[in-house]
Amino acid sequence: MRNEAAGIERLVEIMARLRDPEGGCPWDLEQTFATIAPYTVEEAHEVADAIQREAWDELPGELGDLLFQSVFHARMAEEAGMFAFADVVRAISDKMIARHPHVFGSESNQKSAEQQTKDWETLKSAERGKARVLDGVALGLPALTRAVKLQKRAARVGFDWPTTGEVLEKLREEVAELVEARDRLTATQVEEEFGDLLFVMANLARHMGVDPEGALRGANAKFTRRFGKIEDWLAEAGKTPAESDLAEMDGLWNRARAEDKLRG
């Protein structure tokens, strides 16, 4: 465990020690697959966040945190007699070799990235065998990401709008239904209509080649940056947002937006 050059074996040994019933960490010993799963998702998001911010100095640590999640799950599985970390490594290695016949097999590697993506999906479909079209799209994915994956699966068997224009028309229809629901329906029904609208927005993103999760993360970052400027400008005037009003803050928002546009 003290050998810094030991690589992944060192991390596996550290995890085993943390889960040792005699002398291990009480918190680690209490964990289950269900309790650790939210941390796994959180660590994946933190990796994506570091990449989006181009925080390259933080990325090794974030990737390490995510790797630790795999080791943690594998350790719990080994204790339950299901599988070990070596089986995880073997499974992903075998999968990568099988899904890249143009690299590790006899197929030509003179293919476009688009064709390789189609081949990848074909191989995945073959692996699923007779499973239903939408089976295997993970429930734990962020909702927008899962919506796009569900739509891609359906599109592969021809269930899709042919053009972006038709998606936009459906979007207008869903907006109208939401407006009507706001005034006439229950809160549960309004939520359902809102979900329908978001689902079509995800479909529009797919048709336009936009990652909806990435787009929303960008919008969140932009909102955070601009609102921070509002707070700074109000502070210069000796005020807080709570001491301001909507008209003043909206004017400052427009100022922040104009500055963003000037910066390009």
Image: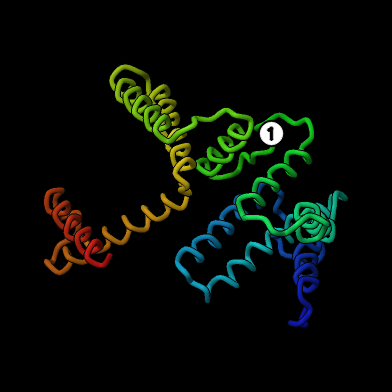
Point 42% across, 51% down: residue: 215
Q: Choose between 148 and 37: the one closer to the eye.
A: 148
Colour scheme shown: rainbow
Residue behind mark 1: 135
Quadrant position of the N terminus in the picture: bottom right
Question: Could you tell me if residue 76 is visible in this image?
Answer: no
Kind of residue indicated by mark 1: Asp
Asked if residue 210 lies left or right of residue 26, the reply is left
Q: Residue furthest right?
A: 81
Q: Is residue 173 above or below residue 218?
A: above
Quarter of the image where one finds residue 192: top left
Question: How many dots with numbers?
Answer: 1
Label 1 crowd (10 A; few <14 / some 14-19 / many >=20): few
Asked if residue 253 lies left or right of residue 163, the reply is left
Q: Choose between 3 and 207: the one closer to the eye.
A: 207
Point 85% across, 52% down: residue: 83
Quadrant position of the C terminus in the picture: bottom left
Point 71% across, 29% down: residue: 132
Of helix, strand and loop, which one carries label 1? loop
Question: Could you tell me if residue 248 is visible in this image?
Answer: yes
Q: Residue furthest top?
A: 184
Q: Is residue 135 above or below residue 13?
A: above
Residue 28: percent from left, percent from top: 70, 59
Residue 167: percent from left, percent from top: 42, 32
Residue 85: percent from left, percent from top: 81, 60
Q: Is residue 240 above or below residue 196?
A: below
Point 31% across, 61% down: residue: 225
Residue 152: percent from left, percent from top: 58, 38
Quarter of the image where one finds residue 198: top left
Q: Is residue 163 above or below residue 219?
A: above
Asked if residue 29 lies left or right of residue 254, the reply is right
